Amino acid sequence: MAEDLLSYQETEELLERIIINKKLYQAESKTGPKFVVFSHPTGHEFLKSRYQREIALLEATGMGLPAIEDLEKLMVERNLKDPDDDKKIEELREKISAQSRLLQLSKLEGRRKPIKETIAGLEQQILEIKNKGDSLFNISADRKADEESVLYLAWVSTCTIDEEKYWPSFDDFEAEEDIIFRNSVLDGFLSFNQGTGVSQLRYLARHNLWRIRYAAALKLGGSLFNRELNDLTPDQLGLLFWSNYYQSIYEMLPDDQPDEEIISEDEELDAYMESYFKRRDAERNEGKVKRRGGSKSKLSAWDRGEEVIVTAAHPEYMNMAYSEKRIDTSESVSDVEVVAPNSRRARNRAKARQNR
């Protein structure tokens, strides 16, 4: 659980990092530690990084570097890659899914531990399959273009403590002579850019430090982050998603709401909510069947050939076929024929009246 991994101070720091989209990072250099500040790129900066990638891809292709697709074919031809690798990865993922469901049902830690180890082993097998021949991909035009894009994002996201670009231009970043420093910054950015794990985001979403702000924003309409809604970071969007998820749980009826112990356990809560929604769907479908059955019973006499009068209030009145049955009325008017307005009999009679 995230609660076991984060102290109060760590929780506060993580929440602050997500809210203001800033992370203080200590990088290594030839002269000793240096501090930089990372912030998640804006949408416009991501657009520029894609532009950098396309330019780099054109240059790499012009230099004769092959595409990844060509390298994959070459790897298969030279038996460097098994053509069934994709099928193996799919099978491994299915096994992981089955183990994950088993993990949700297991409550005792003694039983959960070997399941977790099995999942970790399966994930490692997938990683090994994906990494086969990975070094060969490094000479591809696509990989060179991706590297240029990542370098651009690292440059645009790295600032001083005064929120100025650490390197005035992208060219200055690429020309950095202290390779130790630049690589350390790049490693730190890649870790930062991966975002916060789901378990930690869920932990923050139900933590009082955040829930007070979230509840206040819901009531007062204030802003929770330092960015506009259309440019929120993945962590900010994730925190909002899980906040809404837990808010809906806290607003459930007392008889339906899970215990606090279940709410604090991600896997147990997911299993509980899955069961809850299945039960609700079953009740909803049962209600639909009953309503349809009631509607059917009103027309069952018609289907059995009994005498039935369908008034204009009936939803199928305009579309129902005419009846050839004769109905005896209490006013001594016999042989009354029921004809629906849109039936063939009604249209034929209308034509006959027009031809008279």
Image: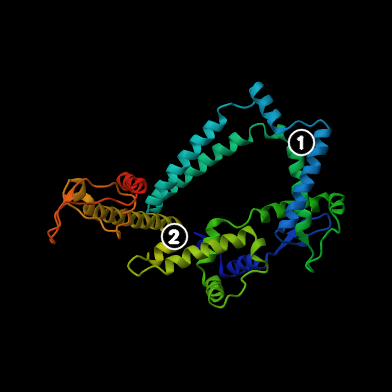
Q: Which residue is mark 2?
A: 265
Q: Position of residue 189 (x, y in %)?
A: 71, 54
* Left or right side of 111 for 65: right
Are there few (<14), some (14-19), or many (20+) residues within 10 Å of tag 2?
some
Asked which quadrant contains residue 333, the reply is bottom left
Q: Is residue 218 above or below residue 295?
A: below
Asked whether residue 176 is in view, the answer is: no
The residue under the point 46% across, 39% down is: 95
Q: Position of residue 77 (x, y in %)?
A: 66, 21
Label 2 element class: loop
- Identified by mark 1, the residue type is Ala
Q: Which residue is mark 1?
A: 141
Are there few (<14), some (14-19), or many (20+) residues within 10 Å of tag 1?
many
Asked which quadrant contains residue 76, the reply is top right
Q: Is residue 80 above or below residue 214?
A: above
- Identified by mark 2, the residue type is Glu
C-alpha gap between disc 2 and disc 1: 45 Å
Q: Is residue 185 above or below residue 259?
A: above
